[in-house]
Image (spheres, rainbow, N blue to C red):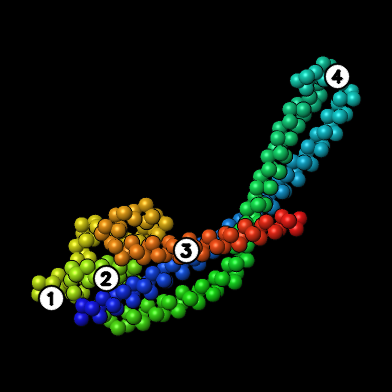
Amino acid sequence: MGSSLKEYLYEVWQCENALITLQRVKERLSFLSEESKRTKMKVSLLSEELRRAEKRLASLEDDIQTLIAIHEIDATGHFYCDDRGNWHHLPEKAVLMQSVASLTSNIVSETKCESAYKFFEQLAQSAIPFISNLISETNDCVNKLYQFDIIHPKYRHSITIIASLFDYLDTGRTNFLVRKNSDPGAYNLYEEDVRNNRVIDAIATGFSELSYQLSEIRKNQYSLYQAIQKSNTIFSDIFVQLNRISDEIRKRSKCNH
């Protein structure tokens, strides 16, 4: 029973890990797609702000040129005449010029980001439905494995728990899920580890945060450690390749312009 149970737990563990990896990819693509929309909105708002600043700057320039024609102005922008009129327009012009330069720089920077995110937004539109189908199919596989009713419902649908249960059997600490004679059973070993704070929950903590605790996880939850490493590798490989494609698209776009 121990060997076949271990094989069963391994299969559940692999399916749960595949499910989490697919969900991470989908969430990341959704985030990048939303970031593209936010960046577009930001560029639009900055452009509108720039147009207002340039319009105000042009108006000030007309006022200043009129004043220069009438009054003598010193180096600080102040008029010598008694009626100094709109002398404060000069310092305001300097501030506006700085604002225009800053807005222009920000628009250039945000436009580059928009170009980068646009690729992921387009990718997400086609990839997310496909990934969603894979998630649904993988979830069906997981549920079919649970329908054998080998694992108690309390311990299902958790990569952390399944990996721990597999570890206990794989390392020979137990051959069963429940206590039998002198064998403590995987459930009891897991509950004991939870009470002694030896279990780190992958879902509650988040995979990205788990990277900082890998040494501790490797020591106490080796199968979970392997799952995290595998998921991180797949996740990283996918987005490294996508970033390369995105960079190539941006380079070609620059050449075309």
Residue 126, horizontal then vertical, whole percent: 59, 72
Q: CA distance from mark 3 to mark 2?
A: 23 Å
Mark number displayed over residue 180: 1
Which residue appears at 41% of the width and 80% of the height?
A: 140
Mark number displayed over residue 166: 2
On the image, which quarter does residue 70 sit in? Answer: top right
Q: Residues within 10 Å of mark 1 (few under 14, many from 20)?
A: few
Pointer 2 or 1: first along the chain: 2
Q: Residues within 10 Å of mark 2 (few under 14, many from 20)?
A: many
**Residue under numbered circle 3:** 235
| Residue 82 vs residue 137, the one in the foreground | 137
Pointer 3 or 1: first along the chain: 1
Q: Is residue 175 left or right of residue 119?
A: left
Q: Amino acid at mark 4?
A: Glu
Mark 2 touches mark 1? (CB < 8 Å): no
**Residue under numbered circle 4:** 72
Regarding residue 83, the answer to whether it shows in the image is: no
Q: Kindly report which numbered mark, 4 or 1, lies closer to the viewer in this rendering.
A: 1
Which residue appears at 46% of the width and 77% of the height?
A: 136
Residue 210, horizontal then vertical, whole percent: 37, 56
Residue 47, horizontal then vertical, whole percent: 71, 48
Q: CA distance from mark 4 to mark 3?
A: 68 Å
Q: Residues within 10 Å of mark 4 (few under 14, many from 20)?
A: few
Q: Is residue 211 left or right of residue 167?
A: right
Quarter of the picture containing the N terminus is bottom left
Q: Kindly report which numbered mark, 3 or 1, lies closer to the viewer in this rendering.
A: 3
Q: Is residue 173 left or right of residue 203?
A: left
